[in-house]
Every structure is written in C-alpha cells, then in structure tokens.
Amino acid sequence: MDVNNITVRGGDEGELLSIAGGKYRILISGEETGGNYAVIEMNVPPGGGPNPHAHPEMQEMFYVAEGEIEFRTESGKTIARKGGFVNIPFGGAVHAFKNISAQPAKLICTVVPSGLEVMFKEISQASGPDEVKAVLQRYRNVAYPVDYLG
C-alpha cells in the first residue's frame, strides 16, 4: 500500500454486488487500505436488509445518506433517518436492519478492520442459504434466526 496514493471514485465506479435484496458498491476495499478499513455503499430497496447477525471481530458504522432504515438490536428497535449515524462496536453485538419505508434507502457503511467487503463478494456469488451460512462461518460471523430480535 502506497500511503501517497489518493483514491477518488466517481458515482458510478466501484464493484457492484447483490446482497440481502439490495445493491452494494465497494467504495474502497481493504486491499486498498492495507486492511485497515473498507467503505461500502448499501442501496437498500423497500423491504430489503439482512437478517440478524453479528461480526465479533469488527466495528461497523452506518451513515444514512438517503431514506430511513429500521435498526434492530437486542436493546430494541430504532429508526435512523437521512443524516443519522449508527455504530455497531467491536465485540459482536447482534443487529439487523430493514428498509420499512416505501422509498429506497442508501447507507454508507464503514468497517474496521476490512474484510466484510470480501465476505460480501463471496455471498453475492453463493448458490443458496447453506453456502451463505458457510461463507459467514468462514469469516467468523454469526447468523441468527430471522425472528431473533423480535
């Protein structure tokens, strides 16, 4: 990694992936940051979003760039609207989010350290739920039943 290289991406650049009913775009990967972090744009359609899960070895932060998203944790539910910010700390807090509105939502997700974007690439190519579960396990993430958070 050359620390003197500045990365600039246009609005239509970056690898596109289909994940959890939405379209995700890798804005910068861990490969480009020496594994320090990755940033992923998550375009979440109405009704889209992942089931309850946890990432015990990473911190995940979401900025709501457009729309609104319902975030669920073991502490309850909250609505994050445009301009809002959600932090999932290190340690594996169980969380899920869903676009419960009638409009698309856009999240900017930063993960520290990187690796989630690599896992997303594999999930986007998975052939079914069993393969998705195997990918999650390989990256030491934990999936929970859809009704785990109520």
Image (cartoon, grey):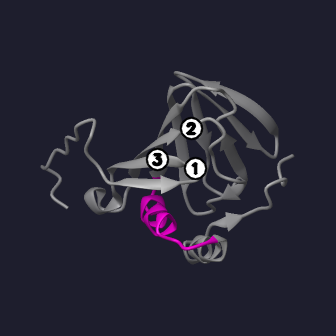
Task: Kindly state the secondary structure of the residue where label 1 is placed.
Answer: loop
Residue 2: quarter of image: bottom left
**Residue 89 left/right relative to 40:** right
Q: Report which residue position mark 2 lands on.
A: 45
In percent of width and height, residue 36 lies at: 37, 57
Kindly state the secondary structure of the residue where label 3 is placed: strand
- Quick one: label 3, few (<14), some, or many (20+) residues within 10 Å? some
Residue 101 lies, with reference to residue 138, above or below; the image says: above
Rendered view: 102 above or below 49:
above
The picture quadrant where one finds residue 46 is top right
Query: What amino acid is found at the position of numbered circle 1 in the picture?
Result: Gly
Label ID, residue 134: none
Do tag 1 and tag 2 residues touch (Cβ < 8 Å)? yes
Residue drawn at 61 percent across, 72 percent down: 128
- Which of 99/127 is in front? 127
The residue located at (29%, 49%) in the rendering is 14
What residue would you read off at disc 3?
23
Quadrant the N terminus occupies = bottom left
Magenta residues (range)? 112-128
Give the residue at x 48% y 61%.
Answer: 120
